[in-house]
Amino acid sequence: MAKKRNLPRQQAQRREPPPDQPVSAALSDLLRVPSGPVDLAAIDTRSTPGFTGNKAAGQQALAALAAPISELQERLFAHGRTGGTRRLLLVVQGMDTSGKGGTMRHAVGLMDPQGVRIKAFGAPTAEEQRRGFLWRIRQALPGPGVVGVFDRSHYEDVIAVPVRRLAQAGTIEKRYDEINQFEAELVESGCELIKVMLHISREEQKARLMARLDDPSRHWKYNPGDIDDRVLWDDFQRAYELALQRCNSDAAPWHVVPADRKWYRNWAVTRLLVDRLRSMDLAWPNAEFDVEKERERLAAT
Ligand code: AMP
Ligand code: MG
């Protein structure tokens, strides 16, 4: 614990995270995928679990989280800079146009970029293909005090890969256990893990893809290959359901965030981050010098 007498007044006051909007139940519990078979169709993509207000209220609630998330992340960063080894990894999965990029901007973007490492995973390179599928994932894990964010992840290897028939069934079958073991070890080593699937409807995806085609400033985001995946929508949903079911341990549970409403998606992911960072209960590091003596030295200059 920090020695309070060593802290200047301003820092001492900052020891408690600022208040923000309470939720009735932990959002993490509301969004957590229950154990057993997963039925994504039963989860309303327009619903807003844990939030009763409208869009304006949601945007306000998100704004109210900006100060808490910033402070909590700074504590984690300070922890890493002073010899601590804890860290956090947010894994974001979702169909094309589900809002992975928007989540990076609006939720992850509330944190200080110095302490955040975003890694987007595309189709593996030739070198990555020669290694095990977790190799590139391990390379990208956050260091001490850092918030790592994966835009797609090792889950592509049990979702896109089987749907596009890029590997043998036997190879894919082994990956669920490999993922569970990898994630259990990661958590055991002191890395907090939040896994989020952004869940949109088929109709919403169509509308978002059409909006990209309608707007020349968004053509760069449009990928004709997205239609090929869209045709396989049901196969993708089944692959997601299987991944969510089979890699949903207590150590590394899955959350499904209804994502047709962008404001809810942004608020919910931010809230999950804030709640988890707060549960880490990180104090500001102790000064490794005599504050009073330094104050006197400085005053004398
Ligand atoms: P985007 O996120 O829109 O830039 O697209 C990245 C593409 O890379 C998606 O189509 C993913 O399915 C694909 N991808 C990512 N990881 C893998 C993987 N391990 N194997 C095959 N495809 C992947
Ligand atoms: Mg894409």
Image (cartoon, grey):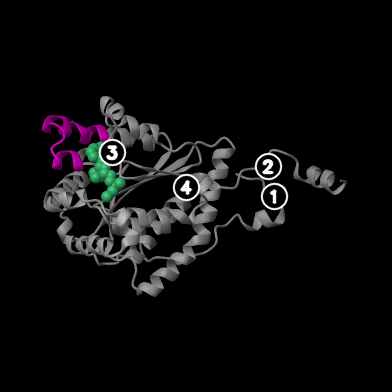
Q: CA distance from mark 1 to mark 4?
A: 21 Å
Residue drawn at (20%, 42%) of the image? 160
Q: CA distance from mark 2 to mark 3?
A: 40 Å
| Residue under pointer 4 | 280
Residue 248 visible in the shown view: no
Decide if ligand 1 comes within 8 Å of the CB at mark 1: no
* Number of other residues with Cα within 10 Å of mark 1, as a class: few under 14, some 14 to 19, many 20 or more: some
Asked whether residue 160 is drawn in magenta, I would say: yes
Instruction: Identify whether 167 is placed above or below 36.
Output: above
Q: Which one is nearer the viewer's eye here, 142 or 19? A: 142
Q: Position of residue 5 (x, y in %)?
A: 71, 49
Q: Main secondary structure of the magenta part?
A: helix
Which SS class for mark 2? loop
Q: Earlier in the sequence, mark 2 or mark 4?
A: 4
Q: Which one is nearer the viewer's eye here, 223 or 144? A: 223
| Residue under pointer 3 | 154
**Magenta residues, start to end:** 159-179
Residue 22, quarter of the rendered image: bottom left
Instruction: Identify whether 289 is placed above or below 63.
Output: above
Residue type, mark 4 in image: Met
Q: CA distance from mark 3 to mark 1?
A: 43 Å
Q: Mark 2 touching mark 1, by CB under 8 A?
A: yes
**On the rendered image, what quadrant is the N terminus found in?**
top right
Q: Earlier in the sequence, mark 4 or mark 3?
A: 3
Q: Earlier in the sequence, mark 2 or mark 3?
A: 3
Which SS class for mark 4? loop
| Residue under pointer 1 | 7
| Residue under pointer 2 | 287
Decide if ligand 1 comes within 8 Å of the CB at mark 3: yes
